[in-house]
Image: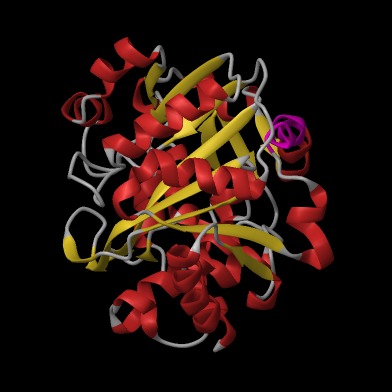
Amino acid sequence: MTLTRRAFLQASAAGAAALALPAPLLHAEGAATVAVVKVGTQGRASALRKALDLLRVPLLTRQRVLLKPNWNSADPFPGSTHPEMLEALIRTLWQLGAREITVADRSGMGHTPTVMRELGVYDLAKTLDIKPLAFDDLPRQGWTHFQDRSLTWQHGFYVPRIAREVDAVIQTCCLKTHRYGGHFTLSLKNTIGLVAKYLPRDSYNYMEELHGSPRQRALIAETNLAYRPALVVLDGVEAFVDGGPDTGRTAGPDLLIVGTDRIAIDAVGVAALREAGTNPTVARGPIFAQDQIARAVDLGLGVRTAAQIRIVAPDPPSEAAAARLRARLASN
């Protein structure tokens, strides 16, 4: 079945709303709120709770949740989601009242079940009562075709049916650059793990189309039309400021960046990369002129300008970091 943009968003809006932030906080005068927390010695679990308290995230009572991490490869953080972040998020989702948690991804630089095994996901599933899922293992009927006249994709693309059927999709991504043409890989790019490389019994390679396109970064943004996350947690305790997505030159911003607006999250993430001393490609020009963000703005995926981003922080160290990020955004 082919799903249009309108039909997909209508079908997923109710589930996304289950964890959507209160309207006055998210959309006051078109703004999106992003929580920035300096992690320090408190650890990710405590920092995450502070961010969610700031954002007034409501309960997930009896909700079915899909948690989408960054398992592009089995390389250690920030090459992939940190085990502490994954466990903290899972425990938090249970505490918020989730009924069922599926943790799933498709690796681009490895065989997903092998990557998950190397990262200890199957062992974690036994202790935290989650359902691990490698999207590679889905049958053909487990995928939904997404098509829209605004797409640069030649034939549309396929996303897992579960992303439409659950009540809420939660995403956790890393803070890093991308040497294979994406320029950076934050929340918008993390969505590529929801897109099929091949559809079963079909030889067309969607990732070959993506990586071979001169408009690769536009195609990345377009995949985000297919779903609406209820929450995005960007783990910037450490970052690749050059190289990536598996290895690269590291820095330690020591931040969690949390919200629901993917454009706002990525704009703050780019500001954090610049603050940490990133490469010339990511450092160049206005943040909202970066191709992924500019295309996401064209598609109406979130805020349209840096002025619409409201950064909040829970304590003085976090506020000092937030002030620097606000200054980076304001200078663009």
**In which quadrant will I find the C terminus?**
bottom right
Number of numbered discs: 0
Answer with left or right where residue 290 lies relative to residue 250.
Answer: right
Is residue 301 shown above or below 86? below
Where residue 237 appears, as percent x and y from the top left, is 31, 56
Chief secondary structure of the magenta span?
helix
Q: In front: 300, or 83?
A: 83
Q: Quadrant of the N terminus?
A: top right
Q: Quadrant of residue 250?
A: bottom left
Visible in this render: residue 192? no
Judging from the image, the colouring scheme is secondary structure
x 20%, y 23%: residue: 117
Magenta-highlighted residues = 11-19
Residue 65 vs residue 328, the one in the foreground? 328
Q: Is residue 227 magenta?
A: no
Residue at 28 percent across and 41 percent down: it is 82
The answer to whether residue 278 is above or below residue 19 is below
Does residue 7 show up? yes
Name the residue at 67% across, 19% down. Answer: 61
Q: Percent x, y for residue 48?
A: 47, 43
> Residue 313 appears at what percent x and percent y?
55, 61
Q: Position of residue 152 (x, y in %)?
A: 57, 60
In this view, 98 is above or below 242: above
